[in-house]
Amino acid sequence: MAEHRLFKTLRSRSIFWSLGSLATGIAATWLWMSSQAEWHAHLHRAYQTGLVLYETLRQETKPPPGIVIEHVALKMGSETETQALPDFPDLPTPMRVTSMSIIANQTGTMTGTRLQLHIVSKNLNYPVAYLTPGSDRLPAERMGDLTRLMASYCSEPLLFARFDQGGWVRVDGTEIWGCGAAPSDKRLIALVILIVGLVLILTQVAETAAQFGGLANALKLRQRFLGKPELEETGPEELREIVRTLNEYLLFEQDRLEKRALLLSGVSHDLGTPATRLRLRTALIEDEELRTKLEADIDQMTGMIESVLTYTRSELNSEEPRRVSLTSLVESIVADYQDIGKPVLFRASQVTAIEKGRSVFGGGGGNLLLPHEDARRILVTARPISLQRAITNLIDNSLKYGRRATVSLEADSETASIIVEDEGTSISEGTLNTLTGPFLRGENANFVEGVGLGLTIVSTIARQHGGTVTFEPLSTGLKAVLKISRQ
């Protein structure tokens, strides 16, 4: 499905999601603040009702809106001085009772009128002890504090009140302090909107970042395994333009390498005929010393051409990767050397280390050691001909500059390493690591045949297999490690 035009460019995506995040933040903030404002208005209405209710109870006037007052008829003799709560009718069971009194002191005296209050609820005791203290607060204000406190909890309380020794009344203020009177809490909705908006924005950012990361991985895989196929154009328009430019550049480089290989192949073929004639004519020279020197020059010239052609073919990377047994491949290479009497030995690994995954509780890490039979089955996805050429070059170097070569394998869950050890190499590790460039040779190579492309070819093939080639010193020589990716 084609992407909407609005999301074609990274700029339009950035603008859209920036405005979307701003709108989400504004909407969430508005819902949160409006919910807070409605709640404060609800509590303020309850407080104002309490102020009027006090005067209503004191003067027995008309109750404020939302309040219904009914006189309570008690049973004869049901109210005593020691009884905590009179025998009110229609009380809920079970019930919790919160009692308090509001005393209005008369100026200059220690006595005053007292308003007795009982709040009856099914499941709640009201913390009246935390109401705003102070002797300077008017009785009506203390009544307003109480009704605001009742409105702040979700309950359906019954309020019973009387002044001094007057009759008891039941005050029904469900419309003021009941659960249904409280405004709906929109803060949870605001939080959900904020979280959903944040998740969507982070998802888009992660998706765009993943598209750029996918391009980097595709470039690596293309170099290693894909060869000529073009990179897929996905993501925003800027990324598509980068991919199109890269595809054009990679095709241009591929064509240039192919032309170079074709040219070198033609030169190598064309030089074959005069080289053959030179060999025939050289054989007719009676001076043996001169004949030997000419034959050596001809061999060096043809060897140099073949080495350059081999290096160019390795750059072309045209071989299709497939699943192979690395152990069998190395064993067959070593067997070929042994058949012609070369001192090359394969040292089989007794165990193979496989990294174990960690559990969700943080345990289970480390390496899992496999026995010899499982260690022999080291499978890799590779180009067998190219890999054979790289291993052969390392063994040839060990035989040229040392007395013998010992080949071994190591593997874990992600990589496999071909290790070639020699005896007697005097060249340093640092010098060898710099000789992976073309036509570079060490100081001890003056009397050894070659043109300086062997390690360059090994390094190129290692990169094509997602690996590296390094060198480490040994007490008896040097160790070359060709590490490749198993996948």
Image: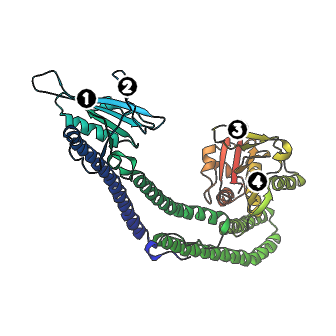
Amino acid type, residue under disc 3 in the picture: Leu
Q: Nearer the viewer, mark 3 or mark 4?
A: 3
**Residue in view at x 39 percent, y 47 percent:** 179
Between disc 2 and disc 4, whose residue precedes? 2
Q: Nearer the viewer, mark 3 or mark 2?
A: 2
Between disc 3 and disc 1, whose residue precedes? 1
- What distance separates the C-alpha of mark 4 from that of mark 1? 117 Å
Between disc 3 and disc 4, whose residue precedes? 4
Tell me the crowding category of disc 1: few under 14, some 14 to 19, or many 20 or more residues within 10 angstroms, Cα based: few
- What distance separates the C-alpha of mark 3 from that of mark 2? 97 Å
- What distance separates the C-alpha of mark 3 from that of mark 1? 108 Å
Tell me the crowding category of disc 4: few under 14, some 14 to 19, or many 20 or more residues within 10 angstroms, Cα based: some
Q: Is residue 278 above or below residue 433?
A: below
Q: Which element is circle 3 on?
A: loop
Q: Is residue 222 left or right of residue 35?
A: right
The quadrant in which the N terminus is found is: bottom right
Q: CB of mark 1 within 8 Å of CB of mark 2? A: no
Q: Quadrant of residue 290?
A: bottom right
Q: Quadrant of residue 392?
A: bottom right
Residue hosting label 4: 396
Q: Exactly how many numbered labels are in the figure?
A: 4
Residue hosting label 3: 474
Residue hosting label 2: 84
Q: Is residue 328 left or right of residue 485?
A: right
Residue hosting label 1: 165
Amino acid type, residue under disc 1 in the picture: Gln
**Residue in view at x 33 percent, y 45 percent:** 173
